[in-house]
Amino acid sequence: MIRLENVTKLYPSQTRPALSDVSVDIEKGEFVFLVGQSGSGKSTFLRLILKEERATSGQVHVAGKDLARLSSWKVPALRRQVGTVFQDFRLLNNKTVQENVAFALEVIGRPRHQIAKVVPEVLDLVGLKGKENRKPDELSGGEQQRVAIARAFVNRPMILIADEPTGNLDPLTSVGIMRLLDRINRTGTTVVMATHDDDIVDQMRRRVIELEAGRVVRDQSRGVYGYSH
Amino acid sequence: MRARFIVNEIGIGLRRNLIMTIAMIITTAVSLGFLGSAVLFNQQVKVMKDYWYDKVEVSVYLCGTDSGPGVAGSCAAGEVTQQQRDAIRADLQAMPEVQQVYYESKAQAFKHFTEQFKNSAIIDNLTPDQMPESYRVKLVDPKKFDVVASAFSGRAGVEEVQDQKALLEKFFKVLTWIQWFASGLALLMILVSIILIVNTIRVAAFSRRRETGIMKLVGASNFSIQLPFLLEGAISGFLGALLATGSFVLLKGVLVDKILEPNFPITRFIGWSDVWLSSGAVFIIGVALAAIASSLALVKYLRV
């Protein structure tokens, strides 16, 4: 589903590569934690998958496509297959919960009747039934992240990328979010989650890829967080 | 993307930035107004040229009562005689370059002159006898003045051969300068409005970077991300062109038809077809200009 082969990424103004010679293969339906200290290359890893950045060398394959050969007008089609969730939720505060989720479908031109059908379904799935007409600032952090997950998942992507989704949440709320991501993973969606949250990684016991200074130093199935910070 | 959704997004964008939008529309209107006025002015000059060049004549002035031995040149022999008068007329009519010859007597010249300067003090002391009599010669080709001039200048009984076209050319030279000035000003204004549109759309794109960021993330096509901004620009261009057209209609309906036309019967003025022509040009240029300026502004902000 996601394959990096000898990928190096060097940003123009820096001397040390953000990623160097990284090779990783992630299968369909896997749940993968990406761990490592700040600046270890986690975000670059995720940005390469979304084609927000291009690899300096090496190959990146996502959903069967070689991203280096993917022309820029096909990038939107790639991103429709990859849902994304961030630490800061990135919701539109002037729209309601329902409108925030519907927005993702409206801008890719889905018909109105389909939007009316799938938005309530996905809000039900993430546990926000009854809060459809709230604005984001009327919700707790955990609820806002659920809206963001609903928006990322409403188009049924093959891959869900989560960049520190629990970074702004308390431990209890984080557990709820992890249950939700686990549930989404069980529908067959590949989940790649970058995190600093050792408790979560230790509890979930899923594959762990650890980056250090741009290199993969550990790739372990059913792993633990593994280093103190 | 659904039409209603796009319309909503454009509405939000235009309202959020209302003052800048108004500035954008007004600047576009003013610059398009200048452009259209320059076009109309050019049309007016063309109309005047066609009208006057069709009427210009070569005047062959005959020696008058003030002629005599004291006068230098061809009139030293005194006032023109009937014999000379007939010979000049016959020779003029015999020239292949000449289309028609009219005779203007002193009395007629006096009448024309007093009509032309009826509000002026010069005519108070003027008598018909002081006016020159002349032949008004209409040429087949107005440029062939030299042929007539060289044939008749200095001939006994002819005081002067005058080409009205030379007078007109001085006048049109001034008009050409004004034309250049007006066109330059129009171009400058267009440049200003392009800069303003680029800036306005840039601000709009910046204030909506959150939305556009999410749109990119969920896989909206570049076209559908840019379209609301492009349409915002194009709508402003359209409204600007509409205002500019309004000013042309006022220009023609009030200034030309009500003020200039009744007071200056000496020429013809631009018609409504000229107004519609420049309005059409202004609409096309206005909308295209705004759309191009908007997409210029978006190149930096809305890359994949």
Image: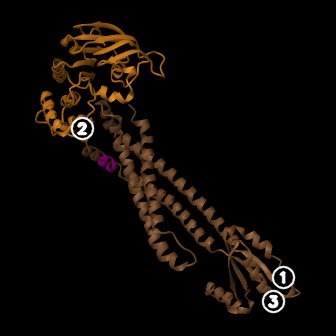
Chain colours: A orange, B brown
The image quarter in which residue A42 lies: top left
The residue singled out by tag 2 in the image is: A106
What is the three-letter code of the residue carrying label 1? Ala
> B241 and B136: which one is in front?
B136
Q: Residue furthest right?
A: B69
Say which of marks 2 and 3 sits in front.
Answer: 3
Q: Magenta stretch containing residue B21, yes or no? A: no
- Same-chain status of marks 3 and 1: yes
**Which region is colored magenta?**
B10-15
The residue singled out by tag 1 in the image is: B156
What is the three-letter code of the residue carrying label 2? Glu
Rendered location of residue A27, percent (x, y): 25, 12
- Same-chain status of marks 2 and 3: no
The numbered mark at residue B73 is none
Q: Which residue is drawn at 74% across and 77% down?
A: B94
The image quarter in which residue A136 lies: top left
The chain letter for the residue carrying disc 1 is B
Rendered location of residue B141, percent (x, y): 67, 69
Q: Which residue lies furthest to the left in this view?
A: A130
Q: Report the magenta stretch's main SS.
A: helix
The chain letter for the residue carrying disc 3 is B
> A27 and A45: which one is in front?
A27
The image quarter in which residue B223 lies: top left
Q: How crowded is mark 2: few (under 14 residues within 10 Å), some or many (20 or more)?
A: many
**Real-space Cα separation, disc 3 to disc 1, in angstroms:** 10 Å
The C terminus of chain A - image quarter: top left
**Real-space Cα separation, disc 1 to disc 2, in angstroms:** 93 Å
The residue singled out by tag 3 in the image is: B81
Disc 1 secondary structure class: loop
Rendered location of residue B189, percent (x, y): 51, 54
Q: How crowded is mark 3: few (under 14 residues within 10 Å), some or many (20 or more)?
A: some
Looking at the picture, does residue A141 appear above or below residue A27? below
